[in-house]
Amino acid sequence: MENQEPVAQGIERLKQKKSEERKITMLSVPDYYSARIIDDLGVDCVMVGDSLAKHLQGEETVFSANIGDIVYYCKIVRKAVQNSILIADMPYSAYELGADDAVTNAKHLIEVGGADAVKLEGGADYFDRIKALVKAGIPVMGHLGLKDSYYKDSSPLVATASDRNKDWDRILDNAKKLEKLGVFALMLECVPGELGKLVHSKLKIPVLGQGAGHHVDGQCLVFHEMMGFHEGYRPKYMKRYARLSQVMSQAIKDFVEDVQTHKFPCEEHEY
């Protein structure tokens, strides 16, 4: 595959950051201009994630995103990304049928979409897919979490930081096995901070968090959420760094008013 040397160097930089206790940054973004800004400002990893189904396609969930969607937006983002590692999210439909499909789809993401690596969600049930991907020379980021239960207030998984149960043991065991299988990094999503700290301390590969506390090696956010493109549901782990929906709404109101009151266009806008 092309670009293996630069990708390997990028992955090595992530490992070096972990060893030097310097935090890693990752943003999920599917459009060209946003990706270009992110890349220029030195974010370590840019991801084309299945969240694009919600933020670009207007879907209620991320599950409608398919391999064709990810490839399409990867090609767009690839044009903008020169320095960051470009990671393509693999939707479940791209690997649920088995290892052969997983390898075929991952190669498509890299060879056609231009991704440097892929991210694959799942634990023990998908180890055979991850093993096949690594064997095929495809850089893989693992992805584990407790998010289905984490959003339920009654869940014992987040009752207390010291409430270590079989689910914690399962996450830790899967994380260790993913490292052994050869993933270059692990995404840990929606778990108690103490569990994030525990996983981070037990792995040599970088552990990136999305709702996994501050002890992990780095953080990932969804660009459209952190920028406040919409005012809808916001997960607890999300910090809004801007309220662009308000800025855009005001701009549109100003435009409508200017047109209706004959303030726009004026002479300076005419040919």
Image (cartoon, helix red, strand yellow):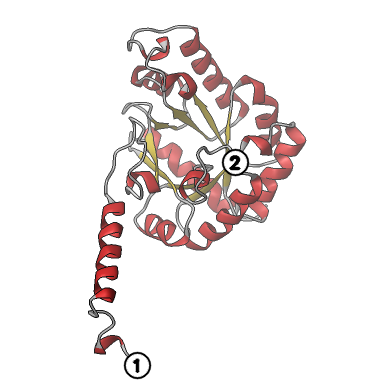
Task: Identify which residue is drawn at 52% across, 50% down.
Answer: 57
Where does label 2 land, which residue?
64
The image quadrant of residue 252 is bottom left
Q: Is residue 82 above or below residue 9?
A: below
In the image, farthest residue toward the bottom: 271
The image quadrant of residue 193 is top left
Looking at the picture, how far across and down is residue 158, in whole percent?
A: 37, 14
Residue 271's label in the rendered image is 1
Q: Is residue 153 above or below residue 236?
A: above
Disc 2 crowd rating (10 Å Cα; few below 14, some 14-19, many 20+) is some
Q: Is residue 5 above or below residue 136?
A: below
| 269 with respect to 119 (left or right) | left
Q: Which amino acid does label 2 sit on?
A: Ser
- Decide which of tag 1 and tag 2 comes sooner along the chain: 2
Query: Camera-side residue: 268 or 158?
Result: 268
| Cα–Cα span, label 1 and label 2 | 46 Å
| 88 with respect to 224 (left or right) | right
Mark 2: secondary structure: loop
Q: Quadrant of the C terminus?
A: bottom left
